[in-house]
């Protein structure tokens, strides 16, 4: 990443989508209810964000049945993992500029 | 928002399913009753019946938590951390307890409750490996650890069973506090969710 590149990924930067992707970095996969509870997003918001992320190739969504009930399972793609890691690193660099003593 | 906020939230949603801890505590108490042959537990069938009840309760709890708080699968990195805690830390604690007080010729034979000490250390290790240092764990299992370290325990007799009781009670209290935290943090569905359901 060039040192003067401060462009933030607009798709990822939206707080709801950033929260979803960050949760997914700490698990191998999670279902819709887990993401909803952990991020605090409403069902509608979460659905909308997941659709955008899937269309961009950042997450994989698998719909299945568990005990005869529909269950939506979500995992990060390799591209998604790289892009969210890059985004957080970018934010840390920006924070480091604001605090010359070093990011806390 | 910091990245740690969401990763900690994910860990809390996974590991603060504290009613499982309550079942674990009841299992330890059941074991001590079985060891002591107290009342109906003089017969093995009562112990196994208790095990069956706890097993059924675990299945019900698993379904409750999965439906209400969702399912996730841990990463390989997480499995490695747990493996270190369980397969390196736990044996170290076990052999340490034998050194402190056991029938081994090399034991220091101190008047300590090694079951209480071991359980406290193992649970603290696992909690650090999963959700990090939490004040309620430090208080509950720190108290268990201190109780085990008091030089008042007889080397033979009922110390082991008392240790199981104390560890069981600590697990129940810790589990209830975990569950309370889980419900408060990730609690009932919001109005928008109910409207959209």
Image (tube, coloured by chain):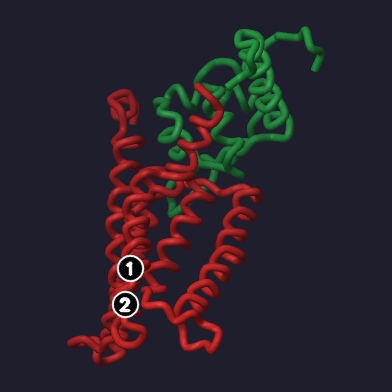
**Toward which corner of the image does residue B186 lie, by quadrant?**
top left
Vertical placement of B41 versus B136: above or below?
A: below
Relative to residue A81, is residue B165 depicted above or below?
A: below
- The residue beneath circle 1 is B150
Which one is in front, A76 or A2?
A2
Residue B6 in sight from this viewpoint: yes
**Foreground of the two, B99 or A69:** B99
Question: Badge 1: few (under 14), some or many (20 or more) residues near its Cα, within 10 Å?
Answer: few
In the image, what residue occupies the spot 52% across and 46% down?
B72
Q: Residue furthest bottom?
A: B43
Residue B126, image x, y percentages: 49, 56
Mark sitting on residue B153: 2
Query: What kind of element bears circle 1?
Result: loop
Q: Position of residue B37 (x, y in %)?
A: 25, 89
Neighbour tally class for label 2: few under 14, some 14-19, many 20 plus, Cα within 10 Å: many
Q: Colour of chain A?
A: green
Q: Quadrant of residue B23?
A: bottom left
> Given the image, what chain letter belongs to the residue carrying mark 2?
B
**In which quadrant of the rendered view does residue B53 lie?**
bottom left
Identify the residue shown where x is 54% and y is 34%: A23
Q: Is residue A10 visible?
A: no
Q: Colour of chain B?
A: red
In the rendered view, tell whether residue A5 sits above or below residue A53.
Answer: above
From the viewer's perspective, is B48 left or right of B80? left
Residue A70 falls left or right of residue B160? right
């Amino acid at each position: 990443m060039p040192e003067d590149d401060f462009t933030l990924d607009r798709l990822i930067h939206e707080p709801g989508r950033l929260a979803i992707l960050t949760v997914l970095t700490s698990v191998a996969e999670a279902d819709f209810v887990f993401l909803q509870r952990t991020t605090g997003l409403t069902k509608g918001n979460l659905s909308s964000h997941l659709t955008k992320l899937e269309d961009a190739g950042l997450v994989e969504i698998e719909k299945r049945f568990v005990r005869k009930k529909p269950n939506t399972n979500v995992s990060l793609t390799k591209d998604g993992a790289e892009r969210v890691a890059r985004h957080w690193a970018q934010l840390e660099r920006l924070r480091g500029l604001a605090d010359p003593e070093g990011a806390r | 928002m910091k990245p740690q906020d969401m990763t900690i939230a994910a860990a809390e949603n996974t590991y603060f399913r504290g009613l499982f801890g309550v079942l674990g505590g009841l299992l330890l108490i059941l074991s001590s009753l079985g060891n002591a042959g107290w009342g109906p537990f003089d017969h093995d069938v009562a112990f196994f019946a208790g095990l069956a009840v706890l097993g059924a309760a675990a299945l019900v709890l698993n379904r409750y938590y999965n439906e209400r708080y969702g399912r996730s699968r841990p990463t390989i990195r997480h499995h490695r951390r747990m493996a270190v805690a369980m397969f390196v830390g736990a044996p170290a604690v076990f052999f340490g307890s034998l050194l402190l007080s056991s029938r081994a010729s090399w034991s220091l034979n101190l008047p300590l409750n090694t079951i209480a000490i071991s359980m406290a250390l193992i649970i603290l290790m696992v909690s650090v490996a999963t959700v990090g240092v939490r004040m309620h764990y430090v208080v509950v299992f720190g108290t268990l650890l201190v109780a085990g370290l008091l030089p008042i325990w007889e080397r033979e007799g009922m110390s082991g069973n008392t240790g199981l009781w104390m560890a069981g009670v600590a697990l129940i209290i810790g589990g209830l506090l975990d569950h309370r935290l889980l419900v408060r943090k990730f609690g009932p569905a919001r109005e928008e969710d109910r409207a959209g359901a």
